[in-house]
Amino acid sequence: MNPPLIEALRQIVGPRHVITSADQTLDSFEIDWRGRYHGKALCVVLPASTTEVAEVVQVCLHHQTSIVTQGGNTGLVGGGVPDSTGSQVVLQLRRMNQILHLDSANSAMTVQAGCILQNLQLAAQQQGFLLPLSLAAEGSCTIGGNLACNAGGTQVIRYGNARDLCLGLEVVTAQGEVWEGLSALRKDNTGYDLKNLFIGSEGTLGIITAATLKLFPLPACKLTAWVALPDLLSAVALLQLARSHLAAGLTGFEVMNHFSLGLVQKHYPHLSLPLPLENEEAPWCVLLEQSDFQNEAHARQLLEHFMEHAFTQGLIKDAVIAQSIQQSDSLWHLRESIPLAQAAEGLNIKHDISLPISKIPAFVQSIEAVIQQNYPGVRIVNFGHLGDGNLHFNIQAAPSDDAKAFLMQNEASINELVYAAVKAHQGSISAEHGIGQLKVDELKKHKSAVALELMRRIKRSMDPLNVLNPGRVISL
Amino acid sequence: MNPPLIEALRQIVGPRHVITSADQTLDSFEIDWRGRYHGKALCVVLPASTTEVAEVVQVCLHHQTSIVTQGGNTGLVGGGVPDSTGSQVVLQLRRMNQILHLDSANSAMTVQAGCILQNLQLAAQQQGFLLPLSLAAEGSCTIGGNLACNAGGTQVIRYGNARDLCLGLEVVTAQGEVWEGLSALRKDNTGYDLKNLFIGSEGTLGIITAATLKLFPLPACKLTAWVALPDLLSAVALLQLARSHLAAGLTGFEVMNHFSLGLVQKHYPHLSLPLPLENEEAPWCVLLEQSDFQNEAHARQLLEHFMEHAFTQGLIKDAVIAQSIQQSDSLWHLRESIPLAQAAEGLNIKHDISLPISKIPAFVQSIEAVIQQNYPGVRIVNFGHLGDGNLHFNIQAAPSDDAKAFLMQNEASINELVYAAVKAHQGSISAEHGIGQLKVDELKKHKSAVALELMRRIKRSMDPLNVLNPGRVISL
């Protein structure tokens, strides 16, 4: 405990907005949503304004106390959970949830960091705009967390990652000052790119308090197709063909192997697959989404023309185009049920990796062979955003094995094999989830000494007292 | 002179590739292409490989000698020209001009920093791809310089600035080490965004030696329209309408006032304007470019439909759609002749500014009134990339005044007025040209103390000996 600090925090945000161990709700801020990381906080402080955030940082600096910033607490790498010392302050931004400005003529909106992503999507839509950031946690994640982690999601192929959607930021620095970088400009070459440095730094360089986001026109319609393919080489060729036919109209390109869809079928038998899994000629499926700005007839004509070409070239063996929004939603629902189905099947070893798209077939072929050789009988749940080179390549124990025991015993060695193959194919060990606490040690093995040293120099220069989320992303 | 250093450099790159004052060609590296900045170099060194660049940095560090990196020497802010001390080494990268790899299935190409932009555009095109970075200097600027300065250009509205087109970088650090960041990944959340920190740092944080660039499908056709508008409010509304009708098909949106087109007519009378300038109801023109991935008939139908709406809404008074590639080229040629025509008219005071698009009409109205009140009779050459909020807002002396004397006497005070208005409208004093040496002092006035301090911390941490382009962008 540190009564003077807690008293000072109460004075800043009001006594109701400092949660200590006297309060039963403290727990919920100390554990991530999956229950993987259990920390112990000194207290949770919930500021209502940027000024209050800055004052909190100043007071923590004065008391030499470090700060873990938390948004929706939906992260997958433990970056928003305090450590186990009970000495850290959790800075929870959910009270800062106002949309500050929507500027139609500039196609931009300015929002506080604690806004929930889905609320922003809806607010944009009500004004006739698309906010394209879209991911599974959108109902509870916050935009501040999305930017701090540079979230990806399902429309990256067309609209980019979170950083590509951000025009400006407001950030409280490790000195407790406010950087007023909340620009709404498309071009601004006045010095170093502070914005992109804060984005993706996972709360270790500064605290994002507000952001200006790019908006796009709403498409007139979306079509969704589900196709069956013989192999990943065909999937990569199909992606190229889709890019040339649909260009910017291609807004989604997801790949799934039959085993991952089989899990969906097993655990959610009420969901029906559009194409049978028994087709051994085509053990891969692709879910492809097309956005059109004219009308549905135009979209359908373009998509059918593209599919004809794909058939003619032998890239696809079978295909279905959704005939309604409901059908389209249920295709997406199948894709999104994979993570839940694999959880239902039992614990598994997860990888969020990316590769140059051209190298995906060779990577998968080589790593599958290595895994099967070393761990006969294990099942591979392979699915992901092929259009962005991002695979969720997960390993499930053999049916006869105890999943938990298998994970405890083999996770480290399987990670080693997978990450070695990733490295050999010039990939990344964290495509969209970030580093947090989960991959700090892994990062040291996979990033060059030069890169690590540059990161340390930056961290030390911007946060010399190591007060912001210490030990996360990069250890000093 | 510093004979041991020069001898060491000769040993690294070969005697023929170190140019000293004994060589008459030294001059050409000491002056920018417009002849505004005249420096004095110790020597120019032309390495052939990344290893040689790293060795050059190490040797310069040993001799406590600073380095100015130079690409095509086409910059507009003096960032690639040595200072006047005669003690700096100019690192000229033009020998590093190889395309290392074009990966069709990953839609990416990896190139050395000294490649000329136009050569890369052509190489991409030959493989069926578009490299969308496009700017006036493309025939001589290098991709390394484009990235170091985060170049903009004419297709930013659709494809973004140089930074948005870059997947990975190889950089020699201020320690003379090589950061192997030449990734070709669309998603990579493994730590701080070093890539974007180097991009736009104008050679002050590291030396870009190679880059991996995103490629896009080539459009099936491009259409160009030229329209006359009553005012800038209509231009902003037209942009919104164009975005909703053409979406990602809108690849160019340039605005020009009548005075700037009048200069083209005056100095290049053989170029004919598509619409008469005498129309006082419509003193603004917009050049709009549409790229289509289907075919010309489809493009024309979409564009005509959009133009009908624009007419109906009273946004445009007159319009011409180019009927051939030649006509389209000549419309673009008119736009690109404005800078030359204003140079022919005499020296002028230039501004490369950006604003939230929604604020452009109010900004222009207020600053024109202020300028005319303070400097009666001056002429305003206002044109730029309205789709990106980027104006080249330039002031030409009254016809009766001596242009050079006017500039000498009034540049500082006019800049003060313009930049104050930019600030009042949340704009930027450098949209796409950067800071270099031209705007270092101006930056101090227009950037917050917090931002400047963050920049200084970063510069000191990454280049503690201040060996890379010292005094440019940020003064310590």
Image: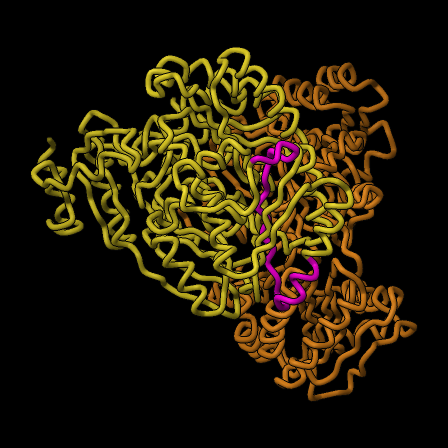
Chain colours: A orange, B yellow
Residue B339, position as x, y percentages in the image: 42, 37
Q: Find residue A302 and report its image quarter.
A: bottom right
Asked if the magenta segment contains residue B350, the reply would be: no
Q: Is residue A197 left or right of residue A138?
A: left
Q: Is residue B12 above or below residue A83?
A: below
Residue A107, position as x, y percentages in the image: 70, 40
Q: Is residue A115 above or below residue A441?
A: above
Query: The N terminus of chain A lies in which quarter of the figure?
Result: top right
Q: Is residue B125 left or right of residue B38?
A: right
Asked if the magenta segment contains residue B280, the reply would be: yes
Q: Is residue A270 above or below residue B3?
A: below
Is residue A36 something one can see in this rendering? no
Is residue A78 something one can see in this rendering? yes
Point 54% across, 53% down: residue: A442
Judge by depth and name the residue closer to the eye, B258 or A66. Answer: B258
Judge by depth and name the residue closer to the eye, A425 or A128. Answer: A128
Judge by depth and name the residue closer to the eye, B449 or B219. Answer: B219
Judge by depth and name the residue closer to the eye, B438 or A251. Answer: B438
**For the magenta stretch, what is the residue range?**
B278-302
Q: How many marks?
A: 0
Q: Is residue B101 left or right of residue B274?
A: left
Q: Residue farthest to the top? A: B374
Residue B189, position as x, y percentages in the image: 58, 50
Point 33% across, 46% down: residue: B177
Q: Find residue B474 and report its image quarter.
A: top left
Residue B455, position as x, y percentages in the image: 47, 28
